[in-house]
Amino acid sequence: MANSPQWFFKETVRGGNSESAESGTEIILEQDNKDFNYENYCNEILPRWLMMTKGYGLTVEDIDKSCPVELEPYEKAYHMAEKEHDSQVYAWVGTYVRSALCFAIDHCLNGKKASSEYLKAPLMENGEDRVNRLRNEFIEERLKAKQEWDRTHNMIDGKD
């Protein structure tokens, strides 16, 4: 029973001295104790810690034996990952969705006279990918120009 987290919830939370009763800590602890029961732990607190420690290899037993201070670094890492995800979603909505929306509105309202274009390259591509993409585009342009030159000069010379 000592290994189970239920032992914690069966204990009564009381202030040890009269000073705590005068300062109001006993009242606060008793109010918190009403909402803090084993069912609440299993339904709300444990799933929250499981979500925050996901990927670190902690089991339910590890979480049960840990205090919140020991789990705090996992919580901070989780919140940092959430902030990063939120910023990525914001950047995606701010660029790609806006570009698609402007493109669609312009083409709906202006038809063939529309001048807007959708993004041609991802914004997060690294420098090496960008250089390779630009190099490939340049080579394709040069090959098309050479083919066009060969075709026109073959027609002039009468070979075609």
Image: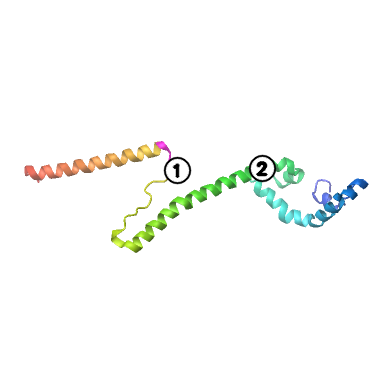
Residue 34 position in % (x across, y down)? 82, 57
Q: Mark 1 packing: few (<14 Cα in 10 Å), some, or many (20+)?
A: few
Give the structural element (helix, strand or loop) at label 1.
loop
Vertical order, 51 against 129 (above or below): below
Which numbered disc covers residue 74? 2
Residue 103 visible in the snapshot = yes
Name the one closer to the observer, 140 or 77: 77
Residue occupying the far front of the picture: 23
Establish if 44 lies above or below 145.
below
Front residue of 142 and 111:
111
* Mark 1 or 2, closer to the camera: 1
Secondary structure under the numbered disc 2 in the rendered image: helix
Report whether 8 appears left or right of 137.
right
Q: Nearer the viewer, residue 150 or 31?
A: 31
Q: Nearer the viewer, residue 14 or 48?
A: 14
Q: Is residue 68 magenta?
A: no
Residue to which mark 1 is pinned = 124
**Of callouts 1 and 2, the N-terminal one:** 2
Residue at image point 51% right, 50% down? 90
- Magenta highlight range: 123-127
Residue 124 covered by magenta stretch: yes
